[in-house]
């Protein structure tokens, strides 16, 4: 039996769908059923159950708000995963949690590997990096999987925002100085599960293949949906956002792909399937 936390989010939703397809038993929890910031509640929840895995998809993901909500951000992204790892160890279950390519400062021009040293530029990224370290130190049967720019059917994301903005507007400006790669939560769930089944615990990265700027991502989405407006470029500084963004944060999936024996699909293919999914 698998315990999923943050199950109403993008990735949590797609893990549920995957386990339905694979006929794997799971218990799906979100904030209401299991608040991951309370270790005693987690202990109580797993007591007497036979969980083989705890997969945590819950997180604090608002990069800008985190600058003023530091405490809550650390509670969710650092201490909660550490505490879940501790509880997983107590019951002998495998623990899985997620981090971000934003842990890197962004000076590189080629994909970051697990060997690169993070230098997180924002409160959100610092909380995630601290979470990686504390979780891996707490329990040896842990997977920490970094990913980037997640999109899926279940929650809000950049693809959905772009589609929303395109309605009723004939001009859009999107930043072209942030480069990474959009990652489909459906692919992330599927590849994560293959990785988890390997039992080769540790730090990994999984994102769709290729890379693009936010502008290129928006262009691909807008062309795919047949928008006829004018798309221009903007600079990140134009928006005066509270949190500093890495200019380049693409993470290489090579290490995970070697273990799995399969390559992540391209981001364009992933967006095609996502658009098909939201149209159905
Ligand atoms: N989204 C991205 O672009 C991105 C990029 C890099 C890494 N990641 C990481 O990938 C993982 C999955 O991301 P995602 O996009 O699927 O996240 P998501 O859609 O934001 O889902 C997170 C879920 O966690 C829930 N949650 C919040 N506080 C909770 C609490 N105290 N206890 C239990 N559940 C709680 C949220 O509920 P509410 O909605 O009610 O708050 C939400 O359903 C996360 O670790 C995330 O940090 C995401």
Image: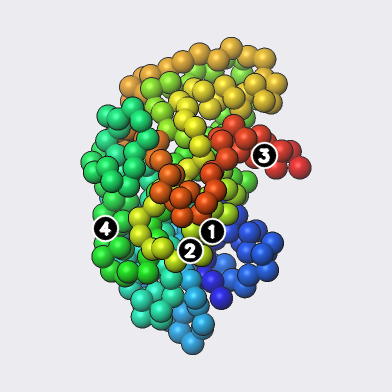
Under tag 2, what secondary structure? helix
Q: Which mark is residue 198?
A: 2
Tell me if residue 93 comes above or below residue 229 in the rendering.
below
| Residue in the image at 26% along x and 58% along y | 133
Q: Is mark 2 within 8 Å of ligand 1?
A: no
Under tag 1, what secondary structure? helix
Q: CA distance from mark 2 to mark 4?
A: 21 Å
| Quadrant containing the C terminus in the rendered view | top right
Colouring style? rainbow
Indicate the quadrant where residue 234 lies: top left
| Residue in the image at 57% along x and 29% along y | 162
Under tag 4, what secondary structure? helix
Q: Which residue is mark 1?
A: 194
Label 2: how many Cα within 10 Å (few below 14, some 14–19, many 20+): few
Q: Which residue is mark 3?
A: 273
Q: CA distance from mark 1 to mark 2?
A: 7 Å
Q: Is mark 3 within 8 Å of ligand 1?
A: no
Pointers 2 and 4 in contact (CB under 8 A)? Answer: no
Q: Which residue is mark 4?
A: 133
Under tag 3, what secondary structure? helix
Q: Would you say 39 lies left or right of 279 here?
A: left
Q: Would you say 223 lies left or right of 56 here?
A: right
Q: Which of disc 1 and disc 3 is earlier in sequence?
A: 1
Q: Which of disc 1 and disc 4 is earlier in sequence?
A: 4
Q: Which of disc 3 and disc 4 is earlier in sequence?
A: 4
């Amino acid at each position: 039996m698998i315990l999923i936390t943050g199950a109403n989010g993008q990735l949590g939703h797609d893990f549920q769908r995957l386990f339905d397809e694979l006929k794997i038993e799971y218990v799906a929890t979100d904030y209401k059923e299991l608040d991951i910031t309370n270790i005693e509640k987690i202990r109580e929840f797993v007591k007497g159950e036979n969980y083989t895995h705890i997969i945590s998809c819950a997180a604090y993901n608002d990069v800008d708000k985190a600058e003023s909500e530091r405490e809550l951000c650390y509670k969710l992204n650092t201490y909660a995963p550490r505490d879940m790892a501790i509880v997983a160890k107590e019951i002998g279950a495998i623990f899985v949690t997620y981090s971000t390519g934003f842990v890197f400062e962004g000076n590189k021009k080629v994909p970051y590997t697990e060997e690169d040293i993070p230098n997180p530029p924002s409160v959100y990224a610092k909380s995630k990096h601290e979470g990686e370290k504390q979780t891996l130190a707490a329990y040896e049967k842990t997977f920490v999987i970094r990913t980037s720019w997640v999109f899926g059917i279940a929650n809000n994301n950049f693809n959905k925002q772009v589609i929303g903005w395109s309605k009723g507007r004939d001009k859009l400006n999107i930043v072209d100085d942030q480069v990474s790669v959009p990652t489909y939560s459906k692919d992330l769930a599927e590849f994560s599960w293959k990785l988890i089944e390997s039992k080769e615990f540790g730090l990994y990265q999984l994102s769709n293949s290729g890379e693009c700027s936010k502008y290129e991502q928006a262009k691909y989405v807008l062309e795919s949906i047949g928008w006829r407006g004018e798309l221009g470029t903007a600079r990140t500084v134009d928006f005066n956002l509270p949190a500093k963004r890495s200019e380049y944060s693409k993470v290489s999936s090579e290490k995970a792909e070697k273990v799995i024996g399969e390559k992540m699909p391209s981001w364009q293919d992933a967006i095609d399937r996502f658009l098909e999914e939201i149209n159905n």
